[in-house]
Amino acid sequence: MAEKKEPMVKPGVCIPWEEKLKELPEITGDEQLFRRVWEDNDALAYIYIWHCLLSF
Amino acid sequence: MVLQSAPHPTFSEPACGRDLSDCIVEARGGMVYHNFLKKVSCYWDFGDIKVDFYKGQVKMAGEKEQLYGERLKRYVTAMRNEKPDMIPIRPFVAEFAAKYAGYTCQEVTHDYEKAFCAARKCASDFDWDAVVGNMVYVWTGLTQAIGLKYYGVPGIDVPADSGFQYREPPEEEAFMKPDEYDQLIEDPTGFLFNVWLPRVSVEVSAMGEATTYRNNLSFLKGGMAMLKYFSSFGKQNELLRCESGTVSAISGILKAPFDILGDKLRGYIGLTMDLFERPEKVLAACEALMPHLAHVALSGADPERQVPITIWMHRGCVPFVSREHFDKFYWPTLKPIIEEILAAGHQVLFYAEGDWNAHLKSFAELPAGSIIYHVDKGDIFEVHKTIGHKFCISGGISNFLLSYGTAAEVREWCKKVIDGVARDGGYIMDASAIIQNDAKIENIRAMTEFTREYGVY
C-alpha cells in the first residue's frame, strides 16, 4: 500500500507564507494576522486549480 | 397589500435562502399586510415556518422540517447499512430534471439557477428522500469563463437538448506529455497552474509567453464565477429543505489518483501505455496526487458528518486495465485516501461507474459501514452477496430500462432488486447511472411509487 509522501508544497498551499515573508520588510505588527489572511486567500487559489482539475 | 419587499433592515437578511418577506408570503399563502409586520415582537409562528425577528432567521418547525428529519434519518440509517423505516429514494437526476421541468439541456447546463430550479421541482413533485442540488453539475458559464476546451457544450458543440460531453484529446495532444511526470511529481499544484491550465484553456497563456488581456480575465472571471457557483449550493440546499423537506445527498468530491491521470492528464491511451513504458513514474505520480486529493475531498465534506463524500470511479477497473494494474496502481493509491477520510469521521459513496465487480474483494478490506457502494453495470446481486454484509448498496435500476422499458417492467425489476438486496436494510433506491433526459417520466414515477409501496420495512 502506498504511503502518502510529504509534498514539497503542502496541500492547500500555492505560495507558502514562509516564502512570502522573505519579501516583506520587518513586520512590526501582528505577524500571525498577516499569516492567517495570506494563507486564507492562498487557499482559495489552491481550491480554484484543484477544482478545475477535479470538478470541471 | 401584498408584501413585496423587506420593510425593515432586520428582514433583509437571507433566510432559508431568500428574503424573509418571501418566506412570509409563502407561509401565509400569498397574502400578508404591512400593518401585521408592524406588530412584530420577537417571534412568530406560521405553522410550517417559525420566524425569529431578532435574529432575522426562519426556523422550520412544522411539516416540512419533520419530513426533513424523517428523510435524513432514513437516508443516514440506510447508509450505515442498517434498516430504516422504509427504503430511501435518492435518484441522481441530471438532465432528466431539465426534461421534467421543461428546460433544454443548454438551459440547465449554462444557467445553473434553472438547473437548481429543476432539481427542486423534481424533489418537490416526486416523493424523494435525497437529491443532489445540481446533478448536471457542470456550469458551462464557468467553464467558458476559464476557457476550458474539453467540453462539448449544448447549443454550441452538441445539440441544445443533448447533455454536455467531455472531449478527450488524441494521444499525441494529451494535456500532459509522457516526459513531464517528474514535474508533476515534484509539485502537482505548480504543474497544474503552469503547465496543465494553459493547455486545457483557450484563454490562459503558457509560461514564458506574453500575457494577454484574455489571460488575465480568465483568472478573474473564473475565480469569481467559481466562488459564486459554489456559494449558491448553500442556498439551494436550504431551499430543498424548506420547500420539500429534501436532504442534500452528498458533499465533497474525490477521484482516484489513477483516474485523474487518465481523465485529465495523460488520457486513457497514454496512461495505459505508460503502465508498460514507465510504470514507476505512474506510481510516483499517483502517490504525489494522494495528499492533494484527500485534502480537497475533506475541504468539501459535510461538517455534520451525515452525508458522504463521493468518489466518481471511472477507468481503473477491469477491463480498462488488468487486475494486476488495479492491484498495483489504482487501489494502493486510493485506499489510504479513503482511510484518511474515514479517520476524519466521513463516509464515502463509491459511485462505481461501469462494472467494478472484479474488485469487490479489495473494497471489502475497508471497515464495515465505511462506504456506500453504488452499482452501475455490475451484477447487484453478486455485489450484495460479496459486500452487502459490510456496506450499504445503492442503484442497480437499469438506465436502459428507465429509457426504453415500460412502467410495468420497471416495477418488476425494482421488486427483484428489493427482494434480492434490500431485505435487511442497507439499500438506497436509485438508477444505475446518472439519469439523463432519455429516461421516461412515467418510468421514474414507477420506480418511485413502487419503492414507496413495496419498500416499507
Image (cartoon, rainbow, N blue to C red):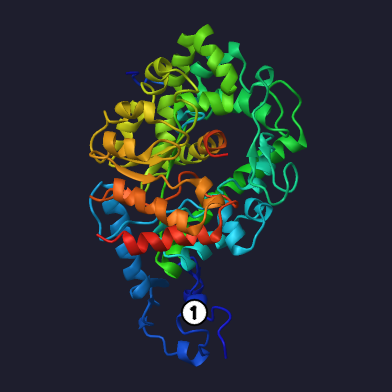
Q: Does the image show residue A30?
A: no
Nearer to the camera, B405 or B220: B405
Judging depth in this view, the residue of B378 and B269 nearest the camera is B378
The quarter of the displayed image where residue B372 is located: top left
B185 in relation to B5, above or below: above
Q: Which residue is mark 1?
A: B26
The chain containing the residue under callout 1 comes to B
Residue sitting at x 47%, y 46%: B398
Number of other residues with Cα within 10 Å of mark 1, as a class: few under 14, some 14 to 19, many 20 or more? some
When the figure is inspected, residue B129 is found, relative to residue B154, above or below; the finding is below
Helix, strand or loop at disc 1? helix
Place residue B376 in its image quadrant. Answer: top left
**Count of numbered marks:** 1
What quarter of the picture does the C terminus of chain B occupy? Answer: bottom left
Return the x and y of residue B225 as percentages of the image width and height.
Answer: 61, 48
Question: x, y percentage for residue A38?
Answer: 49, 38
Q: Is residue B84 above or below residue B143?
A: below
Task: Give the side of residue B357 with respect to residue B24, left or right.
Answer: left
